[in-house]
Image (tube, rainbow, N blue to C red):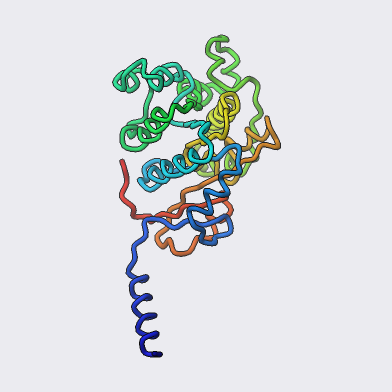
Amino acid sequence: MKILILLFSLTFHLASAQDKPAYILFNSEGKEVRYEKMIKELEKAEVVFFGEQHNDPISHWMELQVMKSLYEKDNRLTLAMEMFESDDQLVLNEYLRGTIEERHLLSETKVWDNYKTDYKPLVEFAKDKKLIVVASNIPRRYANLVYRKGIQALDSLPAEAKQWIAPLPFEIDLELPGYKSMITAMGPHTSAGTAINMVRSQASKDASMAYFILKNRQGQVYHVNGAYHSQNGEGIIWYLKKIQPQIKVLTIHVAEQADITKLDDTHKKTADFIICVPKDMTRTY
């Protein structure tokens, strides 16, 4: 009997050692958790953020799975996306209602190059279930205006244009760790003004996404964005809580590691749940 138990244990160990998981799910402390446990916790949030790696296929597949799971618990779910700019909302709405065809959506909105492979499944699920989809991001031309001329340049926009950005003025805290690290990453050879304007441009995106999330919220909101915009409770979340301090937010963050069996300390506490994917995972672009 002891020999049989030993052989079984050895066989199980060898099988486990040969497994090649596409991802492992951890909580903020680095403890492995099951998908069902994560969903059960996410259901308690008013806003769920999924911080993706833009070219990671696991990110995009998991985004869809989480959306489906949340919808099962709240069919008033609202999808909000960094990948659509706020002034595209009318065209996006027309597509969701079936007024226009997909070719019009693709030609008349500023969809990302990887829309068909990575974001279309989310939009089509929302369309099928008749869910609201919020185009939450600031129009890129205005984010670029901030980068070129500073945050005060937004004041010169006409009222018609200002409807597509967060109400002015909005606070920008350059001491937030994420923004400070962006300035540092630009290097010593970058002029101070350029680095700060880059951060201000980023902040204009974060502030606008927070604003449009709250403006269009019906039921639970599921917001999909690049990991940088929601990690460590900063970015969009910082602005969201400036407006509604008591709002219940939970976050998912996608991290890449060479070895995914144990979460690196640098990734712990970046979010409530961390999806760890192999660094050599195939990319969508």
Taking the image as shown, residue 280 lies to the left or right of residue 135, namely left
In front of the other: 83 or 181: 83
Residue sticking out furthest to the right: 246
Q: Residue at x 61, y 44 (%)?
A: 44
Taking the image as shown, residue 14 lies to the left or right of residue 239, namely left
Q: Residue at x 68, y 30 (%)?
A: 243
Residue 211 rendering spot, x and y as whole percentages: 59, 26
19 in relation to 64, above or below: below
Residue 219 rendering spot, x and y as whole percentages: 57, 32
103 in relation to 266, above or below: above
Q: Residue at x 58, y 59 (%)?
A: 29
Taking the image as shown, residue 4 lies to the left or right of residue 162, namely left
User: Which part of the image, by quadrant, shows the C terminus?
Assistant: top left
Residue 105 rendering spot, x and y as whole percentages: 35, 21
Taking the image as shown, residue 159 lies to the left or right of residue 283, namely right
Residue 252 rendering spot, x and y as whole percentages: 52, 46
Asked if residue 192 shows in the view, the reply is no
User: Which part of the image, by quadrant, shows the N terminus?
Assistant: bottom left
Asked if residue 163 shows in the view, the reply is yes
Q: How many marks?
A: 0
In front of the other: 215 or 209: 215
Residue sticking out furthest to the bottom: 2
